[in-house]
């Protein structure tokens, strides 16, 4: 589509779920949710909506026209399958599993503990499945999640339509955590954006495949490896896959091979560089243009030296960094920065997902004094 994009405000505080049914106590929210739910049911009509991780660009998972429109609006490569969002596990069993009507037993502890929430699981594509083959890219599995955000769940419940949705950014741009980010990237390309405020988690969710033995982590995200292993049984053996792959390598999560999450400015990631004073100074000396710094817990001294034109704190914990990182990468672009220096965090817990995204965004990685251009990521995504 090309035309006007309507921004519809909604208040998640006024959406209440009891079991799988939702009640909306605010008139504007109810009206706007109804408009969006009616629209998203229509083949070819997309709605951007908040989830607790990032904003999604959704269309009916049952419609080739809708799913095709998603790839087109984002300019997304057609070999990168989409996550299907459902309102509840019961809705997934009713609408996505026409043969068994049962989510495979292996997922029971994860579904119980993490849904609704930032975890995606792979389900088999059963015969008679109505999910568009464009969404699964013809694979034998379909990636499914129940978002924790009340706006997202209500949209799916009210339309009774599973929504295929990637993050609502233009392909390769940082994922959107505010409705204004969606407008920046997609205004004129989607008819409706639901504005439900800032996303709580701030980066994409975890993807796991429990249909193989041992189960595999396909993408680190809002739920950590440690949390999943605590579910016990086969999940104790959860294998952590590679976080990136070469452009020509066959991968089970096709999205892994594309460069992602990049602002326009060049991102330079600092790993294991202590308080950053020596490494930042050394790096900045050789840089032309306006330099910005995004710091985490340890780079405050580098910031105090005043060698960067712009400087922002992402926060002192991995969780805080996860929440603000995409927003601040975009903000640095808005400030006209040419090079963004980013303080990395450790790879434990939530840090794994943060570093997975930062390494994909980075053109250069500086490790304790040495640096190398990241040659691993070549394709556009
Ligand atoms: O938080 C999020 O993950 C957001 C919100 C909107 O849900 N979604 C998102 O989707 O960022 P996207 O398209 O950027 O990432 C989906 C990931 C990709 O790495 C894709 O390759 C993988 O899930 N995926 C989807 N279907 C798959 C499948 N059947 N098998 C393996 N990987 C799959
Ligand atoms: Mg994405």
Image (cartoon, helix red, strand yellow):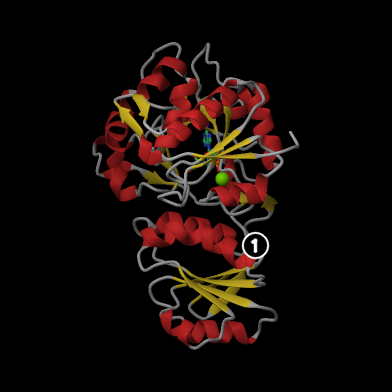
Residue extending furthest toward the front: 27
Q: Is residue 159 above or below residue 220?
A: above
Between 75 and 209, the one nearer to me in the picture? 75
Image location (x, y in percent) of residue 351: 39, 59
Q: Residue at x 59, y 67 (%)?
A: 332
Asked if residue 170 lies left or right of residue 55, the reply is: right
Image location (x, y in percent) of residue 264: 67, 62
Between 233 and 35, the one nearer to me in the picture? 35
Which residue has dot 1 on it? 375
Q: Residue at x 43, y 73 (%)?
A: 272
Q: Is residue 145 visible?
A: no
Q: Residue at x 49, y 87 (%)?
A: 278
Q: Quadrant of ligand 2?
A: top right
Neighbourhood count class around disc 1 (C-alpha, 10 Å): few under 14, some 14–19, many 20 upward: few
Asked if residue 153 lies left or right of residue 369, the reply is: left
Between 96 and 138, the one nearer to me in the picture? 96
Image location (x, y in percent) of residue 230: 24, 44
Secondary structure beneath label 1: loop
Q: Disc 1 beta carbon < 8 A from ligand 1?
A: no
Q: Is residue 290 above or below residue 108?
A: below
Quarter of the image for the N terminus: give it.
Answer: top right
Image location (x, y in percent) of residue 314: 44, 66
């Amino acid at each position: 589509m090309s035309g006007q994009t309507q921004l519809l405000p909604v208040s998640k505080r006024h959406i209440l779920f009891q079991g799988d049914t939702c009640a909306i106590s605010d008139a504007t929210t109810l009206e706007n949710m109804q408009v969006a739910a009616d629209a998203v049911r229509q083949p070819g009509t997309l709605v951007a909506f908040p989830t607790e991780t990032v904003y999604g660009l959704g269309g009916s998972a049952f419609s080739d026209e809708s799913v095709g429109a998603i790839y087109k609006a984002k300019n997304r490569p057609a070999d990168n399958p989409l996550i299907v969002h459902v309102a509840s596990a019961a809705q997934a069993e009713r609408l996505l599993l026409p043969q068994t009507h049962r989510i495979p037993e292996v997922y029971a502890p994860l579904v119980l503990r993490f849904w609704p929430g930032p975890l995606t699981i792979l389900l088999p594509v059963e015969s008679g499945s109505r999910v568009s083959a464009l969404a699964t890219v013809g694979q034998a599995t379909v990636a499914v999640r129940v978002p924790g955000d009340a706006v997202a769940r209500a949209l799916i419940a009210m339309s009774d339509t599973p929504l295929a949705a990637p993050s609502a950014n233009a392909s390769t741009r940082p994922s959107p955590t505010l409705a204004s980010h969606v407008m920046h990237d997609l205004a004129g390309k989607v008819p409706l954006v639901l504005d439900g405020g800032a996303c709580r988690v701030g980066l994409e969710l975890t993807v796991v495949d429990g249909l193989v033995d041992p189960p595999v982590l396909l993408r680190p995200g809002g739920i950590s490896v440690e949390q999943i292993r605590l579910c016990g049984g086969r999940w104790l053996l959860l294998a952590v896959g590679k976080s990136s792959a070469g452009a020509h390598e066959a991968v089970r999560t096709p999205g892994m091979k594309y460069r992602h999450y990049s602002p326009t400015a060049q991102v330079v990631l600092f790993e294991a560089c202590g308080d950053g004073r020596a490494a930042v100074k050394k790096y900045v000396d050789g840089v032309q243009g306006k330099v910005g710094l995004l710091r985490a817990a340890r780079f405050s001294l580098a910031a105090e030296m005043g060698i960067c034109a712009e400087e922002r704190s992402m926060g002192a914990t991995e969780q805080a960094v996860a929440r603000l990182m995409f927003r601040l990468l975009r903000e640095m672009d808005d400030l006209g920065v040419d090079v963004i220096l980013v303080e990395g965090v450790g790879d434990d817990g939530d840090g794994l997902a943060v570093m997975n995204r930062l390494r994909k965004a980075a053109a250069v990685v500086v490790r304790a004094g040495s640096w190398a251009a990241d040659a691993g990521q070549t394709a556009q995504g």
